[in-house]
Image (tube, rainbow, N blue to C red):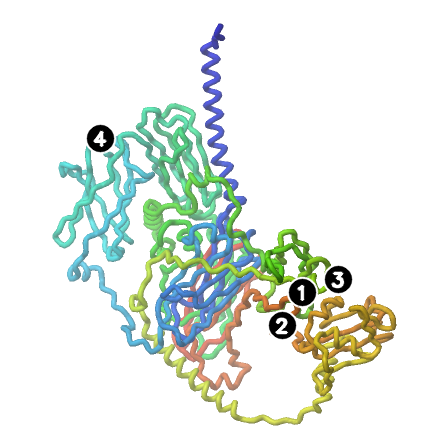
Amino acid sequence: MKKIIPFALLILVITSFTALSDNFFTELVKEKLQEYANQDAPEKIYVHTDKPYYSLGEDIWFTGYLVDGIAHKANPKSYIFYVELINEKDSIVGKKKLFTADVTIPGDFKIDKNWNEGTYLLRAYTNYMRNSDPDYFFQKKIPILSPNSNDSLEQKSIPINERQDNVFLEKPDLTFYPEGGDLIENIKCEVAIKIKNNLYDDIPIKGTIVDENNQFITQFNTSKFGLGKFAFVPVSNKSYFANVDINDSEYSYPLPEALPNGHVLNIINNGDHIFIKVQTNAPNTLYQTYLVGHQRGQLIIDKFESTNTNEYLLKLVTANLNDGVTHFTLFDASGNPVCERLVFIENKKNEVTVDIQKDKASLGTKEPLNISINVKDYEGNNLPSYLSMSVMDLNAFPHDKNAENIKTWLLLNSDLRGEIKDPNYFFNEKNINKRRYLIDLLMLTNGWRRFTWKKLLYDKNSESQFPAEKGIYISGNTKLLKPPYTITPALSRLTFVKPPFEQEPIQKSTDGKFKFGPYAFFDSIPVLIEARLVSFNSEEPKFRELSIMLDKEIESPKVNRIREENNVSEYTKNDAFLKISRYMDEIKKEFEQKRQLLDEIVITANKKEQEDKREKQMNERTLYGFPSHRLDLESSMSVFGAQTAYDLVARMPGVAALGGGISIRGRNPKIMIDNMTVDVDFIKSISSDEISFIDILTGASASMFSDSAGGIIAIYTKNQYGLNTRIKRKPGVIDFTAKGFYTARTFYAPNHLDDFNKFMEADIRTTLHWEPEIKIDENSSKNISFFTSDAKGRYLIQIEGISKTGLPFYKVDTFTVE
């Protein structure tokens, strides 16, 4: 007999299951967004350069900013990032590996005077960023010009009215962007317009919208950057067109077809509030739809619709939101994204004021200028921040107030698809309503590029192919020295052969691989790695029969230019800049001639006796008084037949070498190389050719060391900064030079008060001053001083930075040299 379920109970079961399913999807979205923000957050890099373009032979000075991609604060993932300079043939001509546990790090490139002029590319990224599309890398065009360039130095712009009268205007390339994604029949829809031709960035056009019967519907106008919009209600079974009249020719463009059923997401941003209107003409209404709003992955609003309604209106207060792109998505009852809309939030409470106080507004040549810099928040409180500052000659570099800066990159270009032209225009426009209108058109015509919902919600999390780097790792494997030459388990030990010497604990591998680190060291450092099959205490030669193979450094990613390239001739070349560059080139040649003359002067002076000098050199390297015995290998003395440091020690007075060990008066001595304690086995791997001198300390001479009852054997190498890497080692030992992080050079800042000779020479600098790292704390401002040069005119102070709370800012000021 079948069991009959009451109808009311059946309804309850179905309803409960549906609610559970809906709850599952909404919780999935929240969980994945939280996971993205907390675990998988992207990283962002911005690079501030000292000037917009360069001449051959100059230096590129830069400061890199590394932040997390959500809150724009100090990045908790990577401490390492790479900056590359790439020529027009996509060859990397310069690469810097930089380390910062904070936010900023300075760097520089030297431009070779023999390079070809052209538009170079500055690219910056972390290893972790390589897990995503290369479009997320920071890229900046770097025009490099030749001082002897014969190209036209300055392009004359054509006023708009002259262009319209005398220049043939090409057919506009119009693209239409319905708000939310689609036109829906019988619902009022906003449609944004974008003209892709650069010619129309400053040339507004007018047009009309007509139906298939050429009946007038509405009209539209484009403004800056060829952007515009219009609104209308599509009627069922009708097609619509946009008509534009250019050069007495009418061009017609079909609008996207309207869908008979669907959803519309309309958003109005008035600054303090965002009004969100959701509508549908679908039979199943908005029931069980889900609206989500997030800002760079952080959820700011969500609404699950549980009623049968065709529309609703929400009001979102922006007072507590961060500045930047906000992404709204409407999911239908099946969990499919059906509408998307970007909105730019600009919160008054996030305003940053950079105060630049100069001790004088105008001054003479080669005079000091003192600047006080402070950063304040919306309420006038000191705002702890990281800054970099460049001072440029405005004659050489006319200020482009609309160019990209740290604020436009972090808040716009890094989160949108494609390139935003003249991005600072959207922040410079003083008319707040016009600025809000233009930036909203920008949101309507550019897509969010950080993730897709399908990938975020349903792709399985996998381990990153490129992990975040916090330091340098030295890794590799150990192989048998004889057939079958396979990777084999072994013991490994690493030693940094540079004072202060450091030796890592022995690693025991089961798979034949070793990995030491992470380390944070700069420039280069000599490294010694040893491997044994069984024990480092064993003297059996067969346990040394290993080859040590180091892992290769990961190659740079393929160059992928995300922005349109310009030929150098397309840039506005400033006549003053090239003239100054030529003059600087002449000064350098004159200085080089003087230097060569000085090199020919032979300077003679009385020198100490060679023996006294040598004795002083050796004593300066030791940490004690007089040794009991000393063997100086760099004097006339020689030890015939000694191949290793062990052989040398064995021949010294009072030392007994038996069975591979060493003793002094029957006791085991403490062995040190360049003040680092080592064992007997270690000195057997060091060639005698690398030893400078050896001291034996016994009795009172050895008492200053711990564990010195058996005496001290102190060995010093010829290269006090590391062993000679050209010496052939025994099996089971390799040495090499590990390349550390790059340390930026110091920008030359002359002091014309203290240096009379420099005062007498010409001082011409297109970058007057570069301050790569300025930190403002909550208690005080920062004072910067520098001297003007011989070049008169107006100078630009350009400051870029970001607060510790993640607010980017940009500020310029000027002064005059008379």
- Which label belongs to residue 569? none
Judging by the rendered image, the residue that carries numbered circle 2 is: 728
Alpha carbon distance from label 3 to label 4:
90 Å
Q: CB under 8 Å between callouts 3 and 1?
A: no
Q: Where 306 sits versus 135, above or below?
A: above
Separation (CA) of disc 1 from disc 4: 78 Å
Within 10 angstroms of label 4, few (less than 14), some, or many (20 or more) residues?
Answer: few
Relative side of 255 to 444, left or right: left
Q: Which mark is residue 495?
A: 1
353 and 22: which one is in front?
22
Q: Nearer the viewer, mark 2 or mark 1?
A: 2
Tell me what residue is drawn at x 28 percent, y 74 percent: 151
Q: Is the C-beta separation of discs 3 and 2 under 8 Å?
A: no
Distance between the Cα atoms at labels 3 and 2? Answer: 22 Å
Q: Is residue 474 left or right of residue 239?
A: right
Q: Which residue occupies the extreme top position in the image?
A: 1
- Crowding at mark 2 (Cα within 10 Å: few <14, some 14-19, many 20+): few
User: At label 1, which amino acid type do we have?
Assistant: Thr
Instruction: Give SS at disc 3.
Output: loop
Q: Nearer the viewer, residue 732 or 426?
A: 732
How busy is the neighbourhood of tag 3: few (under 14 within 10 Å), some, or many (20 plus)?
some
In the picture as drawn, the residue positioned furthest to the front comes out as 483
Amino acid type of disc 4?
Answer: Ser
Q: Earlier in the sequence, mark 1 or mark 4?
A: 4
Label drawn at residue 236: 4
- Determine the CA span between mark 3 and mark 1: 19 Å
Indicate the position of residue 28 as horizontal and vertical percent values. Answer: 49, 34
Q: Amino acid at mark 3?
A: Ser
- The structure residue drawn at horizontal position 45% and vertical position 78%, both measured from the top left corner, is 789
Name the residue carrying label 3: 538
Q: Nearer the viewer, residue 397 or 518?
A: 518
